[in-house]
Image (spheres, grey):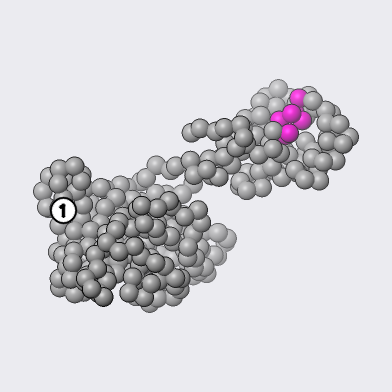
Amino acid sequence: MSTKLHQVPTAAIRLIISIFLPPSADSKRRLRRTHSKPCRNVRVPWAKALATWSAETKSPLLFRTTPLRSAFMILGIINCMLIHAAETHGELKLKPKYFQNFDNLADEKIPDDLMVLMGRFRITGDDSNRFLELPGSPLETFGLLFGSEQKENFEVSVKIKGTSHGRRHPAFGIGINGLGGYRLQVEPGKKTLEIFRADESVIQVPFTWKKNSWIQLKFRISKSEASQWLIQGKAWSDQDKEPDGWLITLTETEEPFAGRASIWGIPYSGIPILFDALTLTTLP
């Protein structure tokens, strides 16, 4: 992980200086007024408390504590700075709990870690780039399950390529929490991105699909409060940069069931739909 000096919040730099040198009256007022929360975008409550304490003290913070506590404080500040820079610049990467890109599979047989619900899925492609293919017929909703059962605080992603035929466009998506859970679905014919609960569309936003190109989908469920869950999704062309924020969000108060992730395809155009890079990642 790389972190440049200009990426570090100014308040964090001033906080480090305040550890070793007593702040002047003017800098003390300025720090309290504008920089009392250098880690306000990071969930580190003790770092926020440390910033406030440093802003209000008249003597060096380092010498008001034991050496061991001082060391922990310095490490905590550095950790806060690194997390802030990594999240701001998209460098904080979590290791996937499950990943399948099909490149190491030699034949058309579906691997045992995938459970086909409906559809004649097969592995296809050349030696350097293989993927999962759903045939263009018959016309039905087809899907399969992947990864381990999860309930909350995880996200899934997939790359999907659909092809249009005249005015007929495919529909495709990725799901979480099993068959009765949630599904993030691209509807090119309606120009929307939708979240389904079971088989019912509950929320949608405008979305323009780039025809005949690979699309990245990312879908997340996280527990935000004692009895509240956020279901968030985004989609973007493989040729574009990933959006900074979520494109669609659903807030639920009913506790979700644990279940496996899924992918779905509806080949309205009569042309095969391709899937690649199935990923499941647990959140810290």
User: Is 152 part of what is drawn in magenta?
Assistant: no
Residue 68, how many percent across, how many down?
A: 67, 24
Q: Is residue 91 above or below residue 2?
A: below
User: Is 15 part of what is drawn in magenta?
Assistant: yes
Compared across the picture, whether 132 is left or right of 26 comes to left
Residue 141, how many percent across, how many down?
A: 24, 72
Q: Quadrant of residue 161?
A: bottom left
Q: Alpha-carbon neighbours of circle 1 within 10 Å: few (<14), some, or many (≥20)?
A: many
Give the magenta range. 14-20
User: Would you name the residue on which mark 1 appears?
Assistant: 123
Q: Which residue: 73% across, 34% down?
A: 15
Residue 86, how many percent across, how many down?
A: 53, 40
Residue 34 seen anywhere in this rendered image of the structure = yes
Q: How many numbered circles are shown?
A: 1
Q: Amino acid at mark 1?
A: Ile
Where disc 1 sits, the SS reads strand
Compared across the picture, whether 41 is left or right of 34 comes to left
Give the dominant element type of the magenta stretch: helix, strand or loop. helix
